[in-house]
Image (cartoon, rainbow, N blue to C red):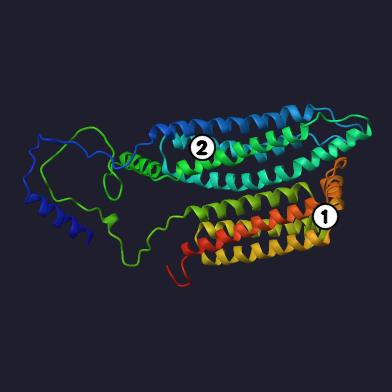
Amino acid sequence: MLHAQITRTYRREKTMEPFSSGQTIQPAAPSFKDRRGWLVAFGVIEILIACFFLLMVVMMTVVVPSMPMPPGQPGMPKGLFALIGFLFYGPFAAVYLTVGIGSIRARNWARIAMIVLSSIWLAFGVLGTLSVAFLLPMILKQQQATMGQNGATLPEGFQGIMTTVMVTTQVIFMVLVPLIFLLFYASKNVKATCLAAGAQRSGVQGFGVPAIAGPVIPTVPSATLPVPASTTLSANQPATRQVPVPVIILAIWYAFSALSTLAAAALIPMTIVFGFVVHGVGARLISLILGTLSGYCAWGLFKLRIEGWWTTIGFLVFSTVSGLVTMFRLDMHSYMDEIYRTMGISPPAFDIFKTNPGFMTFAMGLGMLFAVGLLVLLVYSKRYFPRAGEV
């Protein structure tokens, strides 16, 4: 059918006045604003972000282990800071370096990747900004009370100035910057630029991709266009489905959750479920099961499997209920002290859970807000998953 349509189109074109083989045509002007220059600029910024994460890896490997430890506190295992730096900051450096190069080359996959990264960055930035705005005044107030016992005081207005500076910095780098990235890469002109650049690389014009200005193209006499056999779709051949951005965000979150859970199981033989603290082999086994389940959720979401979507819904409900029961049942101050002792670290003198009981309510509110947001995104993404029995 596709071959017949193309043949009829070319036959209609034969009835029109033909161009001679020496004539040339100029491609139509692009129907969008070319953003290649801005793609290069944003790509350079992303490479600089990657350099920052690489610097943090160096800091964790070289600088932090050489810092003096408080008196009486045992030293950390050799290489632990380097391992944490490589596991935490290394992937971020690799990702931003990759998408930065992809943005400079106007790759559409880099555009989609930055939409996903910016969305996650913005979500955590908003939560982090709320945390700083709530916690910092408490911390400064506690610090001032501690200094007052020793006869020292903070300068007048210091608390207000410090809070303003920290919240403003948080808003700029954790809210505005990812929002700018998100709005830029989600714009229709950037999308059209990346698609047109991809079409030029593959030698395709048209087929839903706006034309982009280019060199003069010589024409040849009209001829019947051959249709490769590979373009003919069989009635039994399923169409390839692209993974939508909301589903990619969910898949990345659960993949990160799986890796974090498995890493925690390797480093800390301790976990908590429904307010019960489990140690040793049992804790590692539970963490292994939860990490594997998170990994399956990530895989099932990315593959657009409806059973993966339902599994993710069930796992989210399980995790949320377990977290709520833990918050109401467990003394977080004692739990955090136990974690520090398990890791061989002395508990810090300042404990936010002990000095500020209201922080527990705030943490519960943030956790519920995140869980509800994740649930809303999951419910919204269900439209992209085929029903049972669909191919």
Taking depth in this image into account, of 58 and 35 the one nearest to the observer is 35
Closer to the camera: disc 1 or disc 2?
Answer: 2
Task: Give coordinates of residue 360: x percent, y percent.
Answer: 78, 53
- For the residue pair 196 and 95, the one nearer the viewer reads as 196
Could you tell me residue 367's position as x and y percent?
69, 55
Q: Is residue 252 above or below residue 162?
A: below
Rendering quarter of residue 235: bottom left
Q: Is residue 296 visible?
A: no
The label shown at residue 53 is none
- 3D distance between C-alphas at marks 1 and 2: 39 Å
Residue bearing mark 2:
98
Residue drawn at x 23%, y 32% is: 215
Give the residue at the far front of this rendering. Answer: 156
Q: Amino acid at mark 1?
A: Gly
Residue at the spot of label 1: 280
Q: Residues within 10 Å of mark 2 (few under 14, many from 20)?
A: some
The three-letter amino acid code for the residue at tag 2 is Thr
Label 1 SS = helix
Residue 108 spot, x, y in % from top left: 42, 43
